[in-house]
Image (cartoon, helix red, strand yellow):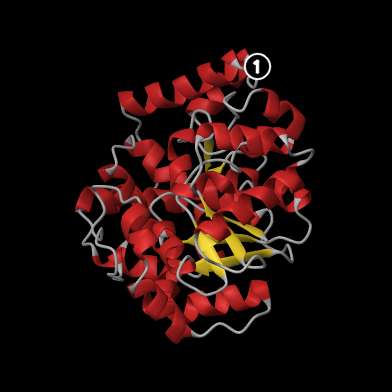
Amino acid sequence: MLVLLGNSPSSGSTLLADLLDSTPYSACGVEINLFSGHRIYDFNAFKKNILKPSSASSIYIKRIIPNIQRLHHYGLSFEDFQDMLQKSDSLSTFSHYFEQQFLALRGKPADSILFEETPQNINTIEAFLGAFPKSYFVHLVRNPIYVYPSLLKRNFPPFVALLTWLFDVAKYVKHIEHERTICLRYEDLVQDPFTETARLVSAISGKQVSATLVEQGYQHNGYRQQHSLKVSSWGVREYGTVKNANHKILSEPEKAALSQLYHVKISDAAAEYYNISPLSFKNAIEIFGYTDDIAKIVPCHEQRKISRTRSDTQSLMKKWLVDRLYHHAKMSDMAMYVNPIEYL
């Protein structure tokens, strides 16, 4: 069974992937952007040109392309991958070949779960659930006041960094009641990582998974120790170390910027265009249980418009221009791209 993980960046998905690859009945490779672009769900067209970019509903991504440079992490060459595609008459057939190849590489039973961990998978949650009627989509969510400074460290423009979490969770919220979506909070994962992982795999597979076996597998997982990809700006980069990265002390400018989110919602125009919920920040943190925790650190200040730097404007304009190039945006959409929010 193929199961996708999708979430906002800097939410802990690499840790979750390390853990999910460590159970007896599941495996998880590195981010590959294979199922996160819409084109693969038009499988015949995808086979003809696998490197044609797909559009993205997240405001920080311009286009999505499969990362073929990472195929070796799955034991595949580009030629192997192309052969697998060409002998597949449907997405279902291809995904089966892809699953079995990697499960065999990882020494897992053929009926195990292949978790594919790419944050941008949130982009295609609807298409995936429709194409795979027995599969699950797992959404990992983290307190946004810690996602924001992490994205700044990764050189996201400030306005884009501030809104990325809201836009990504708004994609998931549209499907939050779906019977085959599962939401896991980062804070719960780091508090009891092996039990939470065992519970997740058991819920999807129907097999009993022991937290003790997950811990043993995690501590001796040579594949993830070698292949797990860490971002240089992360506070926790060592494999085998599970720490809560939410203990960072926010700066006063960071608190001031975050406080303005209390007054923000995704504009109706942006919600319709990106096919997401027109979610407000207040509603989002309430849905995921962060309201009280955030209020203790970031009080609501008097409303003022969130400023945009030149790099923010350039980034959002570039996204609009790229979408125009691929005929996914109109001239009249420019204002929505540059300012995709409303103030309450």
The residue at the point 70 percent across, 52 percent down is: 96
- According to the picture, the residue beneath numbered tag 1 turns out to be 327
**In the picture shown, does residue 83 fall above or below 257?**
above
Q: Is residue 299 visible?
A: no
What amino acid is found at the position of numbered circle 1 in the picture? His
Residue 205: x and y in percent read 66, 73
The structure residue drawn at horizontal position 59% and vertical position 52%, both measured from the top left corner, is 101
Q: Camera-side residue: 251 or 260?
A: 251
Q: Residues within 10 Å of mark 1 (few under 14, many from 20)?
A: few
- State left or right for residue 128 relative to residue 153: right
Look at the numbered disc 1 and give the secondary structure of its residue: loop
Say above or below: 176 vs 305. Answer: below
Residue 301 in which image quadrant: bottom left
Horizontally, residue 252 falls left or right of residue 258, namely left
How many labels, in total? 1
Does 44 sit left or right of 336 as displayed?
right
User: Does residue 285 show up?
Assistant: yes
Residue 120 location (% of width, % of height): 52, 44
Of the pair 243 and 309, the residue shown nearer to us: 243
Quadrant of the image containing the N terminus: bottom right
Return the residue nearer the eye: 146 or 204.
Answer: 204
Where residue 328 sits in the image (x, y, percent)? Answer: 65, 22
What is the x, y in percent for residue 229?
35, 50
Q: In the displayed structure, does residue 257 sit left or right of residue 87? A: left
Q: Residue 41 versus residue 279: which sits nearer the camera?
A: 41
Residue occupying image coordinates x 64% and y 23%:
49
